[in-house]
Amino acid sequence: MKKFKNIIIFTHEKYLKNKDVKTLVSFLKKKKISCEFLIQSSNEVKILSNNKIVKPHTSLKKTTLGNQGLVIVFGGDGLFLSASKFAFILDIPILGINFGKIGFLVDVDKKNALKEITQIILGKYILDNRILIDAKVTNIQNNQITSTSLNDIVIHNFGLLRMIQVKIHVNNYLINVQRSDGIIIATPTGSTAYSMSNGCPIVSPDANVISITPISPHTYSHRPLIINAKDKITVEVERDSIKHSLVTFDGGNNLNVNYPKTIEIKRSKKSLKIIHPNNYNYFQILNKKLKWGGRS
């Protein structure tokens, strides 16, 4: 496996003075690892060395941050999702150190971080390729916005407390006309996030599938649906629902789209490379995080 000498450290400004973060950064410098910091505050991400704001959808290029080999995230799953946009565009792997709460994506405990990072920078790790989904949204002004997501794309109501009505097509075939608070289109990685809270099953991350899950549907017959990741999904928002509908990508990190008319979703041709320690086991993570192993 590839060894690493140039690393991007992605974290929130609240962690900059954290003792554990300082210890990890000091350790990397002693190992002569070059570190570039990306710091998130609110919805902005800045390069610490020059205070320049970078946006993955507009201003980020491979040359912006030099020849980097790895993104290390110090934070929780939300921060990991923000960082994944940068890792995807730069086409480099990403590693998560858990400074948050549950942490399905940031699977390295901060207590074990020094030990695991030592092995990883030497090329001893598991490389996990995760499905990404692309979306093209056409809004009420007929502008088109595109984005790529690791977890999910959600079409939902906002503002008024009322349902929205959508038509869902798979491979140009109408499968459902649905009234609900919204729908979640999720990857296997996203199956432990918002879709799980709405009754969708947990999907093994190496499965080649995409899930479609209603949010509080008006009729109980509307159930989660698992389809082949090769299939194309088109969601049409009914005219009366457009002005109180919103599309969010990975929980609204960096980009939201108001007043959507149509949303076209398909599996991305690219994937996100996630690094895990050699002792990583997905089902062990589920057991631990969801507390399946103990008494209720």
Image (cartoon, rainbow, N blue to C red):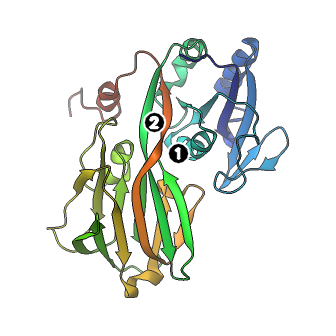
Query: Would residue 136 appear left or right of 219 to someone viewing this image?
Result: right
Circles 1 and 2, Cβ within 8 Å, touching? The answer is yes
Q: Nearer the viewer, residue 277 or 99?
A: 277
For residue 204, which quarter of the picture?
top left
Q: Secondary structure at mark 1?
A: helix
Q: Amino acid at mark 2?
A: Leu
Which residue is under mark 2?
105
In this rendering, the count of numbered labels is 2
Residue at 49% x, 31% y is: 274
Residue 130 as seen in the image, left or right of residue 24: left
What is the crowding at mark 2: few (fewer than 14 residues within 10 Å), some, or many (at least 20)? many
Single out the residue that lies furthest toward the bottom.
240
Q: Residue furthest left?
A: 221
Q: Quadrant of the C terminus?
A: top left
Q: Find residue 126 and report its horizontal and vertical position in percent.
A: 45, 21
The residue singled out by tag 1 in the image is 81
Q: Quadrant of residue 95?
A: top right
Between the C-alphas of marks 1 and 2, the distance is 9 Å
Going from N to C along the chain, the mark reached first, 1 or 2, is: 1
Q: Residues within 10 Å of mark 1 (few under 14, many from 20)?
A: many
Q: Is residue 4 left or right of residue 239?
A: right
Q: Position of residue 30 (x, y in %)?
A: 75, 12
Residue at 35% x, 60% y: name it.
184
Tag 1: amino acid: Leu
